[in-house]
Image: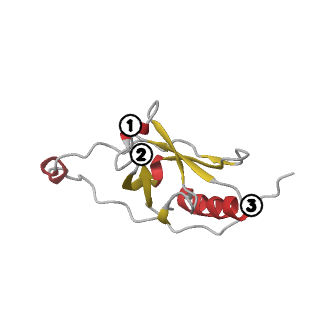
Amino acid sequence: MTSSRSYIARALYEWILDNDCTPYILVDAHRRGVEVPQEYVKDGQIVLNISPTAVRAINIGNDYIMFDGRFGGRALTITVPIPALMAIYAQENGQGMVFEAEPLEDQEEPEAVQAEVVEDEPPSPPKKPGRPHLKVVK
């Protein structure tokens, strides 16, 4: 299954706005694909105000959060891959969610090494799922 992080982030963003609060995100600025102004990064993290009054053209997609913002008078397009999203919360009261750290992506291997991988045995056919069942938990 795909990660639920982007779906939860979209829902919390709407919830925070519906309650007249300011949505902030905490981002791991050293993850691959993160495009943020490095002069504002502290301890490898950056906090960004993503309210509609602070940013333009925000898109919280399944893979990235992207928006246009201004930093020190410069217009920038900010890109935050979903695995780099550490938290989303309301600035006024801190309500929101902190996400578990996702494992770092494996380093890309050169294509020549990947092409040399040979399987000794063919993969086994997938097992047929059994009947679903529920347990009573007391």
Q: Which mark is residue 39?
A: 1
Q: Which of marks 2 and 3 is in front?
A: 2
The x, y position of residue 40, in whole percent, is 43, 38
Of pointers 1 and 3, the one earlier in the residue sequence = 3
CA gap between label 2 and label 3 equals 29 Å
The x, y position of residue 84, in whole percent, is 46, 47
Does the image show residue 114? yes
Residue that appears at 40% across and 54% down: 78
Query: Considering the numbered disc 1 on the image, is that residue within a helix, a strand or a loop?
Result: helix
120 left or right of 97 in image? left
The x, y position of residue 62, in whole percent, is 47, 64
CB within 8 Å, label 2 to label 1: yes
Of pointers 2 and 1, the one earlier in the residue sequence = 1
Residue that appears at 16% across and 52% down: 111
Circle 3 Cα neighbour tier, 10 Å, few/some/many (<14 / 14–19 / ≥20): few
Report the residue that reaches farthest toward the top: 43
CA gap between label 2 and label 1 equals 10 Å
**Residue situated in front as seen by the camera: 25 or 121:** 25
Quick check: 86 above or below 16? above
> Splitting the image into 4 quarters, where does residue 50 fall?
bottom right
- Residue wearing tag 3: 19
Does the image show residue 60? no
Report the residue that reaches farthest toward the front: 73
**Residue situated in front as seen by the camera: 110 or 114:** 110
Q: Which three-letter amino acid code belongs to the residue tagged 3?
A: Asn
- Residue wearing tag 2: 72
Quick check: 40 above or below 123? above
**Residue situated in front as seen by the camera: 78 or 69:** 69
Q: Which three-letter amino acid code belongs to the residue tagged 2?
A: Gly
